[in-house]
Amino acid sequence: MCAALFCVNRSSEVRQVEAAASGISDLEAATDPEVLRHRRQAVNNFLRAKPRTVVDLLHRWRVDATVFGNWTGNLDLRSQMMTVLSLPEFRRKFPESDGLMVRSTSGWQVRSRLQAAGKEEWQFEAHIDQMLATCAEVGVPGDQVVDMGKEQCTILDLVQTSRRSYVVDQESAWSVVAYCHYLPEEPSWQNRFGEWHSYQSIAERLIMSKADEGPCNGTHKQYALALMLRADKRRRMFSRDVRSRVQTYLRNSTSHLVKSQNASGSWPSHWVDERAPGGGHGDGSRSLDRMIQVTAHHIEWALIAERDLRPGDEALTKAAQFLTVALQYNGPEEIVKNYCGYSHAARVIALFMGQDRTTTGDATLP
């Protein structure tokens, strides 16, 4: 494969990146050692970009756990995550912010974006239970202590507080990721208002919305649903009817993706809009940042879904090629401006490489 494919002109970034990605054949992506080298370079490019906020750190740790190993064997990850698990460490990193943990009527919880409104220097999580979902995905145990200074609790305590506070109309995707991991044997619960909720009721509510409705163009829903189906296989929590409806929802999402995928392998932000080949092309739909974010999110849920519920391997490989080119195209100074999108891209590429784990903590791939 010609290395020149990765040399693009910034004056026409979308066109050039798409052209470069389109020029790589699927056979090359599967077999060419140079493609594997470019994938490593792409991930390293992301790793050189320094996270600036708690939200950035939560995204970074998902990548680090994928590349270098999870909490169990990655001592550097454990040390880094003390930034959010220990108030003294948090204050060293973010001296101008009030503490990340706040006490509510239900107990200790992570500060939300709404609770930080008007306080530019305050740190927060971007989505409800984003921190708990990150902890679940990177393997932080439920009995891990969270130090608030004068008080302490555990990760599991935070999960229980979240369930007591849960209401039906909240953003629920990351909550259910955390709940299914830490409380798989407790599929239903009562909140502080006396209302009963369950993993099944959350799934039913998620599939009532349009496929592209919600944060990150709806892709959090597909991720949560795919994860719940995996959990349901281990410990039944859905009725046969709900299981079938969730599967149909993911198949329909895949149908939209098949119809809207661009020639470069990317997906537009309006990925459900099928009025023209290659998906919707309204304002912002084909900005590079949006395509990176949407494409990476879709691959992530696809990789945990059953094969008959997700796009085919050829479509996913092509999408990963687009992300590889895009990550090589931008340097750290550009990556930090869309840290969320690029972090998902880097994690996807690392998953595709099947990179061997290392516990050295060295932030580079060999």
Image (tube, helix red, strand yellow):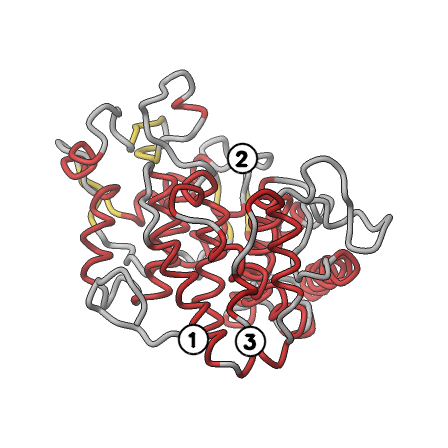
Q: Is residue 51 left or right of residue 229?
A: left
Q: Can residue 228 be seen from the camera position used here? A: no
Distance from disc 1 to disc 2, alpha carbons, whole Å, reads 38 Å
Residue at image mark 3: 1
Q: Tell me the mark number nearer the camera, choosing from 3 and 2.
A: 3
Q: Position of residue 18 (x, y in %)?
A: 65, 56
Whether tag 1 and tag 3 are in contact, CB under 8 A, the answer is no
Residue type, label 1: Gly
Q: Residue furthest right?
A: 275
Q: Identity of the amino acid at label 3? A: Met
The location of residue 179, given as percent across then percent down, is 44, 52
Query: What element does badge 1 sit on?
Result: loop
Q: Where is residue 217 shown, x and y percent of the image?
A: 64, 44
Mark 2 or mark 1, which is nearer the start of the sequence? 2
Q: Secondary structure at mark 3?
A: loop
Give the alpha-carbon distance from disc 1 to disc 3, as whole Å. Answer: 21 Å
Label 2 residue SS: loop
Instruction: Name which of mark 1 and mark 3 comes first in the sequence.
Output: 3
Report the residue marked by disc 2. Answer: 167
Vertical arrangement, residue 229 with respect to residue 12, above or below: below
Amino acid carrying mark 2 in the image: Val
At x 41% / y 59%, what residue is drawn? 181
From the viewer's perspective, is 49 left or right of 353? left
Residue drawn at x 32%, y 25% is 122
Seen from the viewer's position, the closer of residues 69 and 185 is 69
**Front in this rendered view, residue 55 or 160:** 55
Say which of 245 and 311 sits in front.
311
Q: Are marks 1 and 2 in contact (CB under 8 Å)?
A: no
Q: Which residue is mark 1?
A: 354
For the residues labelled 3 and 2, the Cα–Cα distance comes to 52 Å
